[in-house]
């Protein structure tokens, strides 16, 4: 496997003096399924924002496929964020009055994919998450579990290398949560790199490796050899 992410002594200090990250170092290989776990306020979200090209670190080095942000042009950073990264959030972040189809195709507006391919590509990922029968339904009509499946389909539309799942089961009942975690496992099996951010140990154990963060510091980096599949 090749290194997808290389983080060395990452720190993040905000203007008010808060030290959200205090020197985190780790490497994530292509095709891994990694959980980033820790209590609320531990620095998980800050780390997600750095790894997802949403917010720069204060110091330290972050490389994606061997390149730092400083070695990338603005247009390349935008392309990586849109085409190589997929995001699934706890709050779904759907447009409630738009259809499943219209929500799923949103990332395509910022891609080079020809419009003639949009319907076919969207139909394929919507089918993958089991919502073909809901493709024309508005998002507000869906259950929480269905909304999260739409979010996963949207994350997949540009065929990303890396999928971030930020507390993806936080707003779901246990049955819907298990279904979403099963989808993430399937995506990992198909070759996607998955980074799962959670404060729940049972959720984290779905991954194959766990990075545990507390008070902005990486406390442990543990393989999960007996992860639930």
Image (cartoon, grey):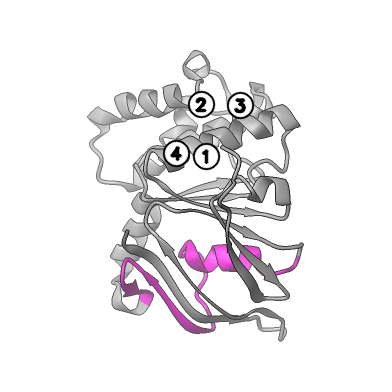
Label 1 CA crowd tier, 10 Å (few <14, some 14–19, many 20+): many
Callout 3: 10 Å neighbours few (<14), some, many (20+)?
many
How far apart marks 3 and 2 lie (CA) works out to: 10 Å
Spatial separation of the CA atoms under disc 1 and disc 2: 20 Å
Q: CA distance from mark 1 to mark 3?
A: 15 Å
Measured in 3D between alpha carbons, the distance from the residue under mark 4 to the one under mark 1, in whole angstroms, is 5 Å
Residue 158 found in image quarter: top left
Task: Classify 10 Å Cα crowding around label 4: few (below 14), some (14-19), many (20 and above).
Answer: some
Answer whether residue 93 is magenta in the image: no
Give the mark nearer the N terminus: 1 vs 2: 2
Quadrant of the snapshot with the C terminus:
top right
Residue tagged 1: 184
The residue tagged 4 is 187
Q: Nearer the viewer, mark 3 or mark 2?
A: 3
Q: Which of labels 1 and 2 is toward the front?
A: 1
Camera-nearest label, 2 or 4: 4
């Amino acid at each position: 496997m090749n290194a997808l992410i290389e983080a060395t002594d990452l720190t993040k200090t905000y203007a008010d003096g808060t030290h959200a990250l205090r020197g985190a170092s780790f490497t994530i290989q292509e095709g891994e399924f990694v959980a980033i776990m820790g209590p609320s306020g531990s620095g998980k979200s800050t780390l997600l924002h750095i790894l997802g090209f949403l917010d720069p670190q204060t110091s330290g080095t972050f490389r994606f496929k061997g390149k730092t942000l400083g070695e990338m042009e603005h247009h390349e950073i935008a392309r990586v964020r849109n085409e190589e990264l997929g995001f699934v959030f706890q709050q779904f972040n759907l447009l409630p009055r738009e259809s499943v189809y219209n929500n799923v195709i949103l990332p395509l507006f910022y891609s080079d994919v020809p419009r003639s391919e949009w319907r076919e590509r969207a139909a394929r990922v919507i089918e993958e998450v089991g919502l073909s029968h809901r493709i024309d339904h508005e998002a507000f009509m869906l259950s929480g579990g269905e909304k999260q499946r739409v979010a996963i389909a949207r994350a997949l539309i540009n065929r990303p290398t890396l999928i971030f799942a930020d507390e993806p089961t936080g707003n779901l009942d246990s049955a819907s949560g298990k279904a979403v975690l099963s989808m993430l496992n399937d995506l990992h099996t198909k070759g996607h790199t998955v980074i799962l951010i959670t404060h729940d140990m049972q959720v984290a154990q779905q991954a194959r490796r766990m990075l545990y963060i507390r008070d902005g510091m990486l406390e442990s980096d543990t393989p999960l050899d007996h992860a639930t599949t």
